[in-house]
Amino acid sequence: MLVLAATPIGRVTDAPPRLAEELAGADVVAAEDTRRLRRLTTELGVEIGGRVVSYFEGNESARTPQLLEALENGDRVVLVTDAGMPSVSDPGYRLVVAAVEADIQVTAVPGPSAVLMALAVSGLPVDRFCFEGFLPRKGGERSRRLAELAAEPRTMVFFEAPHRTGAALSAMAGTFGDDRPGAVCRELTKTYEEVRRGPVGELAEWAADGVRGEVTIVVAGAPPATGGDTDPASLRSAVDALVDDGLSRKDAIAAVAKQTGVPKREVYQVVHSED
């Protein structure tokens, strides 16, 4: 059996009791960081009797066949990552797919989740949401991804590195609009936990000088399309803003058409009317 075991995102006291049981009883424990695993087991007072192997982004492809062989031989393999649920923006997906294809049972130890905690404390709608993981690091790719989400009606949850948080929020403000409600959740469950709520434009200004700690960003979904500013000058301005943010003219036209409800052909004609 493959067991995906959630680990604390901050306080070790948030660990579910079953986590200790699974670590103690595993034949193999695959860990994203074996040093962090040792610290965790020390704090939990757990002694691992099985074999411990590393399983991280750099060796995931090579290690998966080895772990699959152990599973096929009847071993109970417990997979843990640095924080949260394995395979959710962490190593594990490849092993889950391989195990499922080999008809091996896969289960999980539920536990702390930065995604759900940030969503719950954000003050934004929680009835429908989507998790978008990490945005691309390069500005152009990031802008294209955000343009695809410009008309997304569900609340969106993102992970982001602290040193890229300001740039990500600035790009969101440029694509979604300065007034789109959002929240930046920092160091969740830890000593310096902080939740900043407000329009993404204001959050971008707050984060411009840098942010520390683990960051989760929550952004409200797009409001129902009402046409918005659809006069030619406003359409051209919206397209130009997205182009300045790194999108191609074609992608910017498509994004503005989606945002405003104006047919893409008409936005194209407006934009090129002055060429």
Image: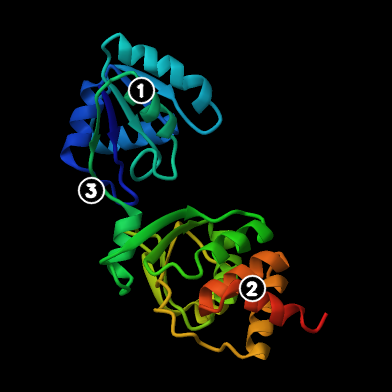
Residue 265 numbered tag: 2
Q: Nearer the viewer, residue 76 or 214?
A: 76
Mark 2 or mark 1: whose residue is earlier in sequence:
1
Mark 1 or mark 3: whose residue is earlier in sequence:
3
Q: Position of residue 21 (x, y in %)?
A: 18, 29
Decide if residue 153 is in sight here. Answer: yes
Q: Are marks 2 and 1 in contact (CB under 8 Å)?
A: no
Q: CA distance from mark 1 to mark 3?
A: 35 Å
Q: Residues within 10 Å of mark 1 (few under 14, many from 20)?
A: few
Residue 208 numbered tag: none
In this view, 111 is above or below 26: below
User: Which residue is disc 1 drawn over?
Assistant: 101
Q: Residues within 10 Å of mark 2 (few under 14, many from 20)?
A: few
Answer left or right for 227 relative to 127. right
Q: Are marks 1 and 3 in contact (CB under 8 Å)?
A: no
Q: CA distance from mark 3 to mark 2?
A: 57 Å
Mark 3 or mark 2: whose residue is earlier in sequence:
3
Which residue lies at the image location 33% right of the left edge and 42% below the top edge?
85
Q: Nearer the viewer, mark 2 or mark 1?
A: 2
Q: Residue furthest right?
A: 275
- Rendered-image quadrant of the C terminus: bottom right
Q: Nearer the viewer, residue 249 or 161?
A: 249
Q: Position of residue 189 (x, y in %)?
A: 31, 58
Q: Please name the amino acid that badge 2 sits on.
A: Arg
Which residue lies at the image location 68% right of the left edge and 90% below the top edge?
233
User: Which residue is disc 3 drawn over?
Assistant: 13
Q: Nearer the viewer, mark 3 or mark 2?
A: 2
Which residue lies at the image location 36% right of the left edge and 38% below the top edge?
86
- Rendered-image quadrant of the N terminus: top left
